[in-house]
Image (cartoon, rainbow, N blue to C red):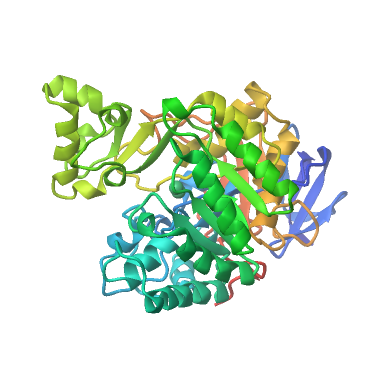
Amino acid sequence: MLDLVIRGAEVIDGSGSPGLITDVGIEGGQITVIGDAGPARQEIDGTGLVLTPGLIDTHAHDDGAFLRHPDMTFKLSQGVTTVVSGNCGFSAIPFDPESDPRKASGGILSGLKGGFTDLSGYFDAVLASAPAINNMMLVGHNTIRSMVMDDPKQAPSQQDLMAMGSHVERALEQGACGFSTGLIYHPGKYSQTEEIIALAQLAGSAGALYTTHMRNEGDHLLEAVDEALRIGRESDVHLHISHHKSAGKPNWGKVKASLARVDVALSQGQRVTLDVYPYTAGSGRMIEYFDLQRVNEDFASVIRIASCPAYREYEGQMLKDIARVQAVDITDLVRDILTAPRGADTICIQFIIDEQDVEHNLRWRDMMVGSDGIPNLRGKPHPRLYGTFAKILGHYVRERGLMSLTEAIRRMTSLPAATFGMNQRGMVRAGFQADLLLFDPATVQDTATYDEPQRLAAGIRTVMVNGKIAWQDGQHQMAGSGHMLKYRSGSYAG
Ligand code: ZN
Ligand code: CU
């Protein structure tokens, strides 16, 4: 007898094919029947609802959250069943228990606390906390560069390069899906292109990915795209460009030229993919964006404080408003925040993107979706953490009609599963893992805002992870059924 059957939902299978009203039966954590299903121990009525594969977040910073918040409510509640972590050059692994975890993780991977040194050890630690959703990992350049080099502002010696390379290789052997960079961040920004090529080659020869937060997303976006494409070519590696955007008003519109370059590369046979987050603001560690000697006033004026251990009262406020009320110069305010005790841990939100560019990105035929959410739940985090996927389904699909529902589901399920090497996931198909989402297409909507960023998505009925009901009608079921995924080889088994 089947463990569970969902009857009468419109099944959108993730392949891009149109939906079909039918039953889906589950047994032993897998989808076993699509079509007329016999009796089951548990039945769910899907009438009037849509059943899809669980959604995949291609750009997450959840490495530490899996240990600190294994319920992963911010992702699960919007229908996400799998994330790719270790992005922007920051990863939980390799980990040196002797060193300050904030240093290597760039301060955005909350919750890192020893007990492991490599990817297998990290997977064991996460599984011990019974995570709600699945996780695939990248190994991050900034993390290994901070760990290996005494002075990360220098060029690496041959020995440093070898040491970095062996960390990359070890992570790939243990199941990482690729190597990530964050070339605007410390210490990745000190690296030359040749260093990245040497390391990305290791991912290339393993058949894995090179993902990048490019060196520039504003004034020099196009040069940065050229650099990324060159790295992809010369390393013979699949290039994935993270959170594609043009930042800063003078650069708005440049995403068109940037995507045109990608189109040319694709037409020449290069493997390139991209993702985007559906918001006009970015978010990150504030100290990374400022030179304290020459604080950029224009940039400061579009910043809002998300989380600030030194001044909790600033959370949720624009810097320009704080400066006005206190009658201080905004550049002095920036210096004061960043030099205060734990000032370096301040997370900010910067309004730097044009909505037209967001839509242009989403219209591009194979654009995937990554939340880039920073799971620091203190203060007022960027609403993308809780809202990204419901916003795609509610706002961009239903209200704006940028793409059909079947197409949006394909881009958030089978396409990322194939790209990031998630075996037997991303489609409603017999033999696939039962990661499933049942929702109401007429009411699905993000409700998280900049003021109320932790509000849960509306319209999500049931989320299943590896065959277990993980989320039901706004209630976490504490199934703890998430798996740790190894690139192109299924789940990590310990
Ligand atoms: Zn990034
Ligand atoms: Cu990121």
Does 269 sit left or right of 55 as displayed? Answer: right
Q: How many marks?
A: 0
Q: Quadrant of the C terminus?
A: bottom right
* Towards the viewer: 72 or 208: 208
Residue 140: x %, y % from top left: 45, 62
Residue 246 seen from this side: yes
* Towards the viewer: 117 or 139: 139
| Residue displayed at 36% across by 39% down | 381
Quadrant in which residue 318 is drawn:
top left
Residue 411: x %, y % from top left: 68, 43
Residue 469 seen from this side: no
| Residue displayed at 75% across by 35% down | 47
* Towards the viewer: 296 or 60: 296
Q: Is residue 494 above or below residue 331?
A: below
Does 80 sit left or right of 287 as displayed? Answer: right
Q: Is residue 317 above or below residue 18?
A: above
Residue 311: x %, y % from top left: 17, 38
| Residue displayed at 34% across by 55% down | 110
Residue 67: x %, y % from top left: 40, 61
Quadrant in which residue 321 is drawn:
top left
Q: Is residue 47 above or below residue 152?
A: above
Does 9 sit left or right of 75 as displayed? Answer: right
